[in-house]
Image (cartoon, rainbow, N blue to C red):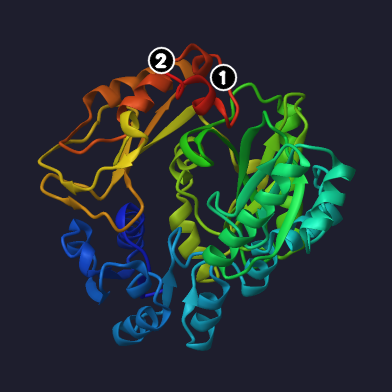
Amino acid sequence: MFSRILIANRGEVALRIIRACKELGIESVAVYSQGDSNASYLHLADERVCIGKAPSVDSYLNIPRIIAAAEIADVDAIHPGYGFLAENAHFLEVCQDCKIEFIGPSLQSMTLLGDKIRAKALAREVGVPMSPDSNGAVESVEDALVIAEQIGYPVAIKAAAGGGGRGIRFAHNAASLKSMYTQAKTEAEIAFNDGTLFMEKCIENFRHVEVQLLGDKHGNVVHLYERDCSVQRRQQKVVEETPAPGLDPGLRKEMCEAAVRLAKACNYYNAGTVEFMLDENNNFYFLEVNTRIQVEHPITEMVTGIDLVKWQLRIAAGEKLPFAQEDIKTNGVAIECRINAEDPANNFRPSPGRVDAFVAPGGFGVRWDSHVYQGYNIPPTYDSLVGKLIAHQPTRSEAIATTKRALDEFVIEPTKTTVPLCRRIMSEQKFVDAEWDTKYIEREMMGD
């Protein structure tokens, strides 16, 4: 096992990794920007290193500064968390060149799966269901128009190097396709420095279901079942739960086995997630692979009893998974609400600033993952995530009731958050009945 690692991230995920390190007897080094100098978790790390000014490009996205901090602190490995450099193949390559273990997949796996076109080709090769698509890059608007006629409108135009809901546009006819293609290409070039696009048939009313994987360096891959992440706003997840409600056991088995098959085909190890679209007729189609820990990983931990972050560390250190697929069982239902510093009543306007009053929810069946405290200044520079409220109970109705109760306990002032939105979602009959898709919030809740 490693003796000392550096955490190349911030906020609640940095705290999450520090806690896992402490329990495994690993020293942790926390890097931070000047904008995060008041972060409470910095005092829980064994060492702290400032890596630059608040803007991410000067700190959490600055590879030379992170590597310099790692070398000065004399660490064995780097954990990238999620976001920032977590899926950056160049960063992984630099870590390897510097003889620092990257806590994540191999460079080969990340490079292959990070390119959506190559990932889709591999998925197709191993028999993972695919929606009709361009079967490769779309080089021009003219090509896009021809392909759209072949697969049928509406179509989705996506960045091959995309992620996080960026570099995606939708077109319902030829006229809109021309402008959307240009918009998607421009955004992809700015966001990912890669304007390569592909197209696929747009499945408009789909559920977003993902399968959690763990693989070791000895060729073993298991799934930890699925999560439903359909309750989203503009491709950004708001509420997640596991198991996915109403999923037929046979379909669940088929989806999970498809995810494992894909991971084994590229010798995948560490934590990863295979995402699927599930249409109204219960047909599922490959969407993408996330080669990192997910924000919503706690709900899987709650129902399986498996600490995913600890296993990321153990796998990176070369340990073999001690459990086979048949050993992994689930217990109960877990729901996660993402609490963001945004004002739902004002078009989700960011709400940074000092937190004058703060009371975290608690009680039986409640987990609260957060780095925020009373007196903390939420910086305007980064993602608006304040924390993750997780409820775990034997049944879905009990999990919903616990989530509602915990949301009622939550106090954060004067910061505006998504707590009222999450509270309303929990009370909506269509949510209770699990009658939703990825457009649920916009369609049902944003029109009034």
Residue at the spot 73% in from the left edge and 64% down from the top edge: 266
Q: Quadrant of the N terminus?
A: bottom left
Q: Residue furthest top?
A: 429
Q: As rendered, which of 425 and 7 lies closer to the eye?
A: 425
Amino acid, disc 2: Ser
Label 2 crowding class (10 Å Cα cut-off): few <14, some 14-19, many 20+?
Answer: few
Q: CA distance from mark 1 to mark 2?
A: 12 Å
Seen in the picture, residue 92 relative to 315 is either above or below; the reply is below
Between disc 1 and disc 2, whose residue precedes?
2
**Which quadrant does the C terminus fall into?**
top left
Taking the image as drawn, is residue 315 in sight?
yes
Residue 226 location in percent, x, y?
A: 60, 38
Residue type pointed to by label 1: Ala
Q: Residue sitting at 49 percent across and 61 percent down?
A: 312
Query: How many numbered circles does the render carry?
Result: 2
Left or right: residue 273 compared with residue 72: right
User: Badge 2 is on which residue?
Assistant: 427
Q: Specify the farthest residue to the front.
A: 175
**Picture layout, residue 385 above or below residue 78:** above
Relative to 429, does residue 134 appear above or below in the rendering? below
Any mark on residue 434, and which? 1
User: Which residue: 83% across, 57% down?
Assistant: 143
| Relative height, residue 223 to residue 238 (above, below) | below
Mark 1 lies on a secondary structure that is loop
x then y, percent, for residue 257: 74, 44
Q: Is residue 387 left or right of residue 167?
A: left
Label 2: which secondary element: helix
Q: Is residue 103 left or right of residue 324?
A: left
- Residue 321 in which image quadrant: bottom right
